[in-house]
Amino acid sequence: MEKCVYLLDEILSLNGSDVKAIMDSGLNAQELIFSDGDYLQECLKLDKSLVSRLSSLKHLIAEISLQELRNKVVIKGTKDVVKYLEVTLRTLSVEHFVVLFLNKGNAVIDYVDVGGAYDNVQVDYRLIIKRALVSEAANIICAHNHPSGNVPPSIQDKAFTTSLKKILGYLNIRLLDHIIITADSYYSFVSRKRAKYHSLTDEVSGSDDAIKSK
């Protein structure tokens, strides 16, 4: 924890009260950075300025992770997606829905993050279709988090995935996978399997179904 505070001090220029508040929170670095701002401020009583700086750091890390994903030559399988999206999705207190738009070689050419509510996300099919047509995507991968920790897809998740796949099919666009991410595991619709990962720096474990180019 002391190392975590030292690194945050180097990045955020902490003062004495900030350091004490972080130490008293009992959160590790990942939890501290990616926890909901209202929770940090209202429940843990962290200073508004500190919460704002932590939020800025979170957005920077998220942007770097997504940019790395965008810069990958090709997405070869579910692990490639989870490795980057887990950074931003696994610790969020509300559901978020992310769509990756890929070309024929499965390189990421665009993405969109749809903010959600406490336990569900209402996603407009038209938003996905419009973005896919504008970016001239050939393939799409969807992912969203379950803050509850329950990794199996809900009835709504299954219905949405089936409908989206059918609609995209009419436009000759493939839905390659829909991934559900929780704090300690993820579920892939394409393999219908649950797998676990250990930390943000570890390679995700479990078998991986390759995502083939069109």
Image (tube, rainbow, N blue to C red):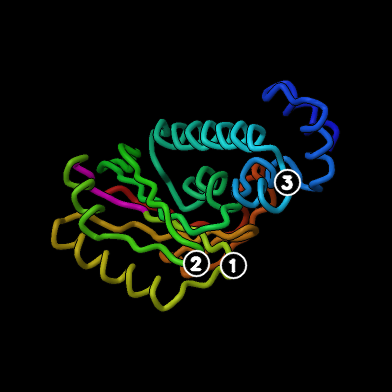
Mark 2 → mark 1, Cα distance in angstroms: 8 Å
- Residue bearing mark 3: 45
Residue 107 spot, x, y in % from top left? 34, 38
Examine the structure image and report whether residue 139 is included in the region drawn in magenta: yes
Instruction: Locate the N terminus and report the quarter of the image it occupies.
Output: top right
In the picture, the disc for residue 148 is 1
**Residue 169, quarter of the rendered image:** bottom left
Residues at marks 3 and 2 touching, judged by CB atoms closer than 8 Å: no
Q: Residues within 10 Å of mark 2 (few under 14, many from 20)?
A: few
Task: Name the residue type under label 1.
Answer: Ser
Mark 3 → mark 2, Cα distance in angstroms: 24 Å
Viewed as shown, does residue 113 lie left or right of 23?
Answer: left
In the picture, the disc for residue 119 is 2
Residue 44 spot, x, y in % from top left? 73, 49
Q: Residue at x 73, y 46 (%)?
A: 45
| Towards the viewer: 146 or 20 | 20
* 3 vs 2, front mark: 3
Q: Residue at x 33, y 75 (%)?
A: 159
| Towards the viewer: 190 or 46 | 46
Residue 155 spot, x, y in % from top left? 41, 78
Q: Which residues are magenta?
A: 136-141
Q: Residue at x 51, y 63 (%)?
A: 118
Viewed as shown, does residue 36 lie left or right of 62?
Answer: right
Residues at marks 2 and 1 touching, judged by CB atoms closer than 8 Å: yes
Which element type, helix, strand or loop, lies under badge 1? loop
Viewed as shown, does residue 96 lie left or right of 168?
Answer: right
For marks 2 and 1, the one nearer the N-term is 2
Which element type, helix, strand or loop, lies under badge 2? loop
Residues at marks 3 and 1 touching, judged by CB atoms closer than 8 Å: no
**Residue 124, quarter of the rendered image:** bottom left
Q: Considering only vertical position in the picture, is 212 above or below 19?
A: below
Task: Name the residue type under label 3.
Answer: Lys
